[in-house]
């Protein structure tokens, strides 16, 4: 009896240890699982990218206060309809996650994105990201082309206006020049320059002749006596 009781003690001790470990392990795993679901998984990213590919937030109108955020609010509603999607993620969080995924894809950080999830999920996610990035770049290029066209159009209008002004000024100068030439042909030089005769060398002689002709001569005494007789 004594031997059997002594041999049973180790088995009871082992049983107690196994029971305590069995109860502690699931609790720890459940806590880690709940904490992990606060973060995005590969499946969440896939749902997010599918919704973003449909809504196309990169095509939101520029200049509007909430144009982009309205798109991501719509994406958040679409994602929340999926039961497996991470909970309590508003549009702002989804926009941050989307921008991060696009940046990582552009920087070719594919290895860091394969830390969790299945290969099928990552394969489809990379395909979606590649398609989204190409469409984003295409939309950006289209916007740049439209801006360049509008800029060239404005420059062309300004250049045409400057040319028209120069042509108008040239016609005005031609009219002024033509008027000045016709005015010079109609002017009488004698009326324009009345004092040119006095400046010539013979002007003094002419004045002397004119003054002599116009002046009365004084009568001498002999002429007076002859007139009396």
Image: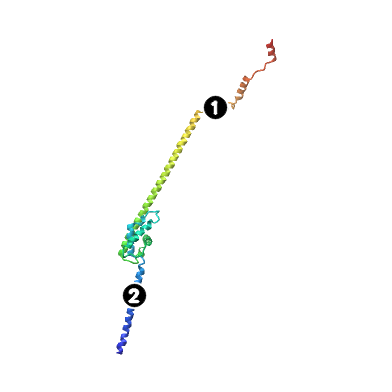
Q: Sequence-wise, which precedes: disc 2 or disc 1?
A: 2
Q: Residue at x 61, y 21 (%)?
A: 210
Residue 30 in sight: yes
Whether residue 3 is situated above or below residue 28 in the rendered picture:
below
Display colour scheme: rainbow
**CB atoms of marks 2 and 1 within 8 Å:** no
Q: Name the residue that disc number 2 marks.
A: 25
Quadrant of the image for the C terminus? top right
The quadrant where residue 132 appears: bottom left
Quadrant of the image for the N terminus? bottom left
Nearer the observer: mark 2 or 1; the answer is 2
Q: Residue at x 34, y 75 (%)?
A: 25
Give the image location of residue 106, x and y in percent. 37, 59
Element class at badge 1: helix
Whether residue 107 is situated above or below residue 12 in the rendered picture:
above
Whether residue 183 is situated above or below residue 138 in the rendered picture:
above
Q: Name the residue that disc number 1 marks.
A: 191
> Label 2 vs label 1: CA separation?
127 Å
Q: Residues within 10 Å of mark 2 (few under 14, many from 20)?
A: few
**Nearer-the-camera pick, 178 or 90:** 90
């Amino acid at each position: 009896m004594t031997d059997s009781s002594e041999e049973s003690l180790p088995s009871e001790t082992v049983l107690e240890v196994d029971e305590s470990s069995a109860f502690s392990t699931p609790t720890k795993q459940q806590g880690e699982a709940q904490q992990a679901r606060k973060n995005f998984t590969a499946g969440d990213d896939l749902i997010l990218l599918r919704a973003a590919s449909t809504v196309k937030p990169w095509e939101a109108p520029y200049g509007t206060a909430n144009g982009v955020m309205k798109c991501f609010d719509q994406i958040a509603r679409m994602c929340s309809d999926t039961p497996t999607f991470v909970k309590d993620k508003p549009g702002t969080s989804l926009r941050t996650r989307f921008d991060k995924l696009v940046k990582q894809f552009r920087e070719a950080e594919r290895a860091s994105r394969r830390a969790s999830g299945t290969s099928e999920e990552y394969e489809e996610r990379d395909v979606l990201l590649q398609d989204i990035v190409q469409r984003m770049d295409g939309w950006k290029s289209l916007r740049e082309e439209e801006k360049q066209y509008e800029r060239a159009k404005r420059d062309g209008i300004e250049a045409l206006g400057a040319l028209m002004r120069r042509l108008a000024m040239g016609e005005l100068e031609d009219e002024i020049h033509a008027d000045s030439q016709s005015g010079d042909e109609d002017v009488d030089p004698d009326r324009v320059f009345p004092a040119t005769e006095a400046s010539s060398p013979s002007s003094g002689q002419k004045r002397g002749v004119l003054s002599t002709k116009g002046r009365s001569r004084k009568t001498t005494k002999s002429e007076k006596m002859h007139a009396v007789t």
